Amino acid sequence: MIAEEKINEAISTNEKAFLENLRTIMQIPSVKGSSEKDAPFGKGPKKALETIVPIIERCGFKAKVVNNAMAYAQWGDDDENYIGIIDHLDVVPVGDKWKFNPWDLSDENGRLYGRGILDNKGPALATLWAMKILKDLGYRPKRTIRLVFGSDEENGSKDVPLYLEKEKPPIFGWTADCKYPVVYGERGIVNYSIFTPILDGSLSQIKNLQGDMSKDHVPDELSIEIKNKKVESHGIRVPSNAPEMGKNAITYLAKKIVDENLVSGQLNNYFKWIVKALHQKHYGEGLGIAFHDNDSGKLIMTPTGLNIENNGMRIEIAIRYPVSYQEKQITAGIKNNIPVDSNIKVIRSIPSVMHDKNSKFIQILSEVYEKVTGLDGTPVTTTGATYARVMPNIIAFGPSFPGQKGIAHKENEWMDLDDLLLSIKIYMRSLERLGSLE
């Protein structure tokens, strides 16, 4: 084991170079774009992969781009039996409410800001520097270590099948794209589209419903014309897996319409249903699906989209359900609690994933986390969705610490510098332990 003081000194010495290289990566607007030749997820994500390669090589590791979808840094010669860390360099769009330049690395009183600082460029570079510092300090792993940088995690992880066409999966590893301590289970995800017919002519009272609506976040700004008068709804944007921390502009719009009697007829009844079933009901209680279990806690639910269509309204709902439940149970509950004659359709379906929390690998990471931080390392589950669902033998581990929630996928995304440097140390000690296994 490398002495504690040597690790602390090396992290301090490397801080400047680490942040300079992190800034280089963060200045790339790596949002998914149109597929092009040699760039399946667009120019931005591909540029991020091209930019990380020379950084990897300067750190002293073998670099390779796989199928124009993922790049990796490899420490060791075994291409088939390796410890894998699977992070990503693609990011979600930024919006227009930033205090800081989203395409840069900003520091205000030790808090770092920028798109991707938490999700996931900061932790990805922290892991690379953990490898670099270990190497510089003379550590030599018995097992090959490979850090993989993805380019499509935010839009379905279609980069992983492209990687697995050419490469073996890791024997074990993590993605630094969730929270501490070790995450051994991820809840099931299902998104629904619910169409409700409005056939009494009352739909003509509204038009031009507009706003930033996407499955990854709670919408915060909506506008609609009601009887030729513009009506706005203002909420608070948060990730769709933490709706209780925000304000959903869809349900607040519905409440305003109902409270002020702005529409009539079947349309009024529809907005009353939204208020009754969905407004500030984040755990499915308004839809008859308030499920929970001991491993993963309560079901999480939020509307993410609302549209005016011919002869009706369509709402989209995102749900994260406990690991012991099945999608069919969610669907059955919702069907009994939506307006008459509504049509429900599954538009996204990702089953839950569970790993043995008593495995030797997970126990090692738990022990490292407890020793480095002094915090409880008991493995947990998450509402999030990470590469652990699609890359075999991967669990989630970091980077958010207990109490830090609802930071990613919103304006002024942040991570404290001290936490980022602490993650370097956690990942160093984790790689030191895993890399020493026979």
Image (cartoon, rainbow, N blue to C red):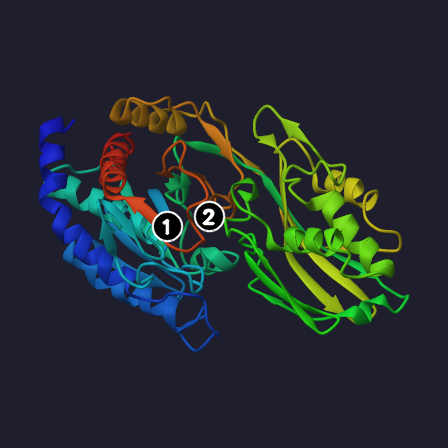
Taking the image as shown, residue 240 lies to the left or right of residue 22, namely right
Taking the image as shown, residue 434 lies to the left or right of residue 61, namely right
Taking the image as shown, residue 51 lies to the left or right of residue 174, namely left
Name the quadrant of the C terminus: top left
**Place of residue 7 in the rendered image (x, y in percent of width and height, measured from the top left):** 13, 34
Q: Between 383 and 47, which is closer to the camera in this rendering? A: 383
Residue drawn at point x = 10 percent, y = 43 percent? 136
Name the quadrant of the N terminus: top left
| Callouts 1 and 2 close, C-beta under 8 Å | yes
Q: Residue furthest front?
A: 260
Residue drawn at point x = 26 percent, y = 42 percent? 420
**Place of residue 192 in the rendered image (x, y in percent of width and height, measured from the top left):** 70, 53
Amino acid at dot 1: Asp
Q: Which residue is mark 2?
A: 387
Q: Between 166 and 178, which is closer to the camera in this rendering? A: 178
Q: Residues within 10 Å of mark 2 (few under 14, many from 20)?
A: many
Residue 87 - label: 1
Q: Is residue 102 visible in the rendered structure shown here?
A: yes
Taking the image as shown, residue 147 lies to the left or right of residue 62, namely right
Residue drawn at point x = 23 percent, y = 39 percent? 418
**Place of residue 245 in the rendered image (x, y in percent of width and height, measured from the top left):** 51, 41
